[in-house]
Image (tube, helix red, strand yellow):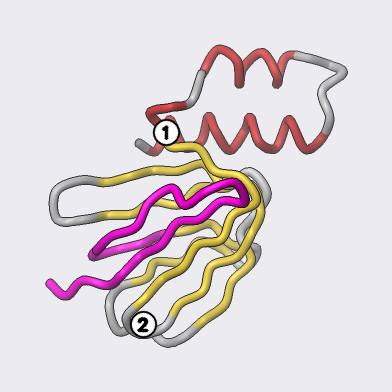
Amino acid sequence: MAEMTVELVAVERRLWSGQATLVSAQTTEGEIGIMYGHEPVLGQLVEGGTVAITTEGERLVVAVHGGFLSVTGKTVTILAESADFSGDIDVDAAKAVLADTTASDEAIAVAKGQLRAVERA
């Protein structure tokens, strides 16, 4: 299976870079799956969404909060405002945010995205 180069970058740092066979992401237009040779596209990531990156040996699931997805035939670049790998997410802390009646809409969206990423992992 052909592989494409994928870069996952958050505002604060590059989180992951490598070769992948499939990338799926939640965009404002719906969920999109990208494989090698995909038509060029630019998509806006949803607030509190997820991105999954499938390589030959593993599947990485990441909670993303806002940003963009840029696709060419051979590359995918994910530019997120913030991102967390599913394995690094504190589930109890995310649930606490959802239970907090004073939490901001943005904090709630981030927490929902984090829990979604854990579920998809």
Q: Which residues are magenta?
A: 1-24
- Towards the viewer: 93 or 13: 13
Q: Is residue 5 toward the left or the right of residue 1 in the image? A: right
At label 2, the amino acid type is His
On the image, the x and y values in percent for residue 45 come to 61, 59
Say which quadrant the C terminus sits in: top left
Give the residue pinned by disc 1.
86
Q: Earlier in the sequence, mark 2 or mark 1?
A: 2
Say which quadrant the N terminus sits in: bottom left
Q: Secondary structure at mark 1?
A: helix
On the image, the x and y values in percent for residue 61 come to 39, 43
Tell me which corner region of the image, top left, top right, bottom left or bottom right, holds residue 29: bottom right
Badge 2 local density, few (<14 within 10 Å), some, or many (20+)? some
Q: Which mark is residue 107?
A: none
On the image, the x and y values in percent for residue 87 come to 38, 28
Q: Secondary structure at mark 2?
A: loop
Give the residue pinned by disc 2.
38
User: How many marks are shown on the rendered structure?
Assistant: 2
Taking the view exactly as shown, the residue that stands out farthest to the right is: 102
Q: Is residue 47 toward the left or the right of residue 6 in the image? A: right
93 up-or-down from 22: above or below: above
Query: Which residue is painted at 27% across and 54% down in the image?
Result: 54
33 up-or-down from 61: above or below: below
Query: Which residue is painted at 43% across and 30% down in the image?
Result: 118
